[in-house]
Amino acid sequence: MDHLDTLRTFVAVADAGGFAKAARQRASSAPAVTRAIGALERHLGTPLLHRTTRSLRLTEAGESFLADCRRILGELDAAEAAVTGVRTEPRGVLAVTAPSLFGRRHVAPLLLDFLTAHPQVSARAFFADRVVHLIDEGYDVALRIAHLADSSLTAVPVGALRRVVVASPAYLAQHGEPRAPADLATHLAIGFHFDGRASAPWLFNNPREVGQPQQRLLVNAIDVKIAAACAGHGLARTLAYQVTDEVRDGRLCIVMVEHEPPPVPVHLVYPAGRMAAAKVRSFVGFAAERLRQVPVLQGRGLESPQDAAHAAVR
């Protein structure tokens, strides 16, 4: 058994979701691919795939082994390219993950353009509001909106996002505008919870200044929170990119600007550093250039005539 070839066959089967399609991609036959996977499972002493007459899915061991295979094969391809001096053309399946709303608004369009520019690359995108473990879950690149913990991942900075408090003009007209964290005690708010956990406390640029509004509504969807704020149900704490359209057209106003906490950094992260596969290196360079042109990531893009008039009143 050619072990590396078998690993590539296993990755092809997992990506294709079936033996016949993987066989076509590998210029082989379905029986040969089936035998190769069977031999690999016997060698490892554990099943990698659940097979039925209609579907095929990875076992828990298969999920873990797939992630390792992607990493090993990617590093091997990069090492060979480095030794031969050949600039490898991006190819293969690129797996990308990002937060849901940011992914839909900013990552998906550039990913489509990247695929147009690189016809030998296909992509798998997963947009979710949780931290995706790249190696364990088989992803090549993630966009992270957070202060990064030390890790083995390579991080490429692309900007930062303001953390703002917003409210509708109607809400502010009825309840007044909060000017300091202490004022929040008399205000209503729409809170956000993640995975059933309670909403985090509201923090500001001075850690000694605290304030917490009454959260009459608690949701786990950003778009619901923003819609409720636009409808006048209270204040909402958001990242700047989440409310660019609403602020620009006057449905929401930013308040307490002078008390905003420091912006949250935004990075593209990926494993393996300079040994990353050509598809990863190429995508990260392409995406970083595009994202650095997004105004909201550079602290711009939230200005509007309505905000200027609102600021003049203050």
Image (tube, rainbow, N blue to C red):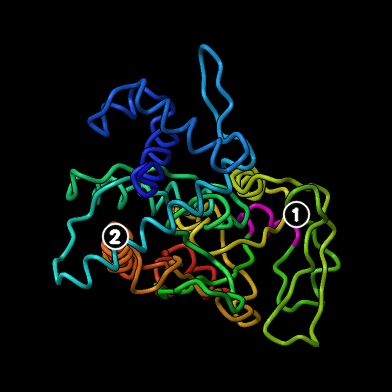
Q: CA distance from mark 2 to mark 1?
A: 47 Å
- Front-most of 284 and 70? 70
Q: Quadrant of the N terminus?
A: top left
Residue 191: image tag: 1
Would residue 104 be seen by someone viewing this image from the given angle? yes
Would residue 190 be seen by someone viewing this image from the given angle? no
Q: Residue at x 70, y 68 (%)?
A: 177
Q: Amino acid at mark 2?
A: Asp
Residue range highlighted in magenta: 167-175
Q: Quadrant of the C terminus?
A: bottom right
Location of residue 6 with respect to 36 vertically, above or below? below
- Indicate which label's residue lies in the foreground, 2 or 1: 2
Q: Amino acid at mark 1?
A: Gly
In the displayed structure image, the side of residue 179 where residue 243 appears, left or right: left
- Front-most of 130 and 228? 130
Secondary structure category for the residue under label 1: strand
Residue 229, image x, y percentages: 65, 50
Location of residue 232 with respect to 161 vertically, above or below? above
Let me know if residue 82 is in the magenta part.
no
In the displayed structure image, the side of residue 62 where residue 109 appears, left or right: left
Splitting the image into 4 quarters, where does residue 253 fall? bottom right
Residue 199, image x, y percentages: 79, 58
Q: Residue furthest top?
A: 53
Q: Residue at x 68, y 48 (%)?
A: 232
Q: Residue at x 34, y 21 (%)?
A: 30
Q: Residues within 10 Å of mark 1 (few under 14, many from 20)?
A: many
Q: Residue at x 46, y 33 (%)?
A: 37
- Front-most of 118 and 261? 118
In the displayed structure image, the side of residue 67 where residue 95 appears, left or right: left
Residue 265, image x, y percentages: 51, 75
For mark 2, what is the residue? 77
The answer to which of marks 2 and 1 sits earlier in the sequence is 2
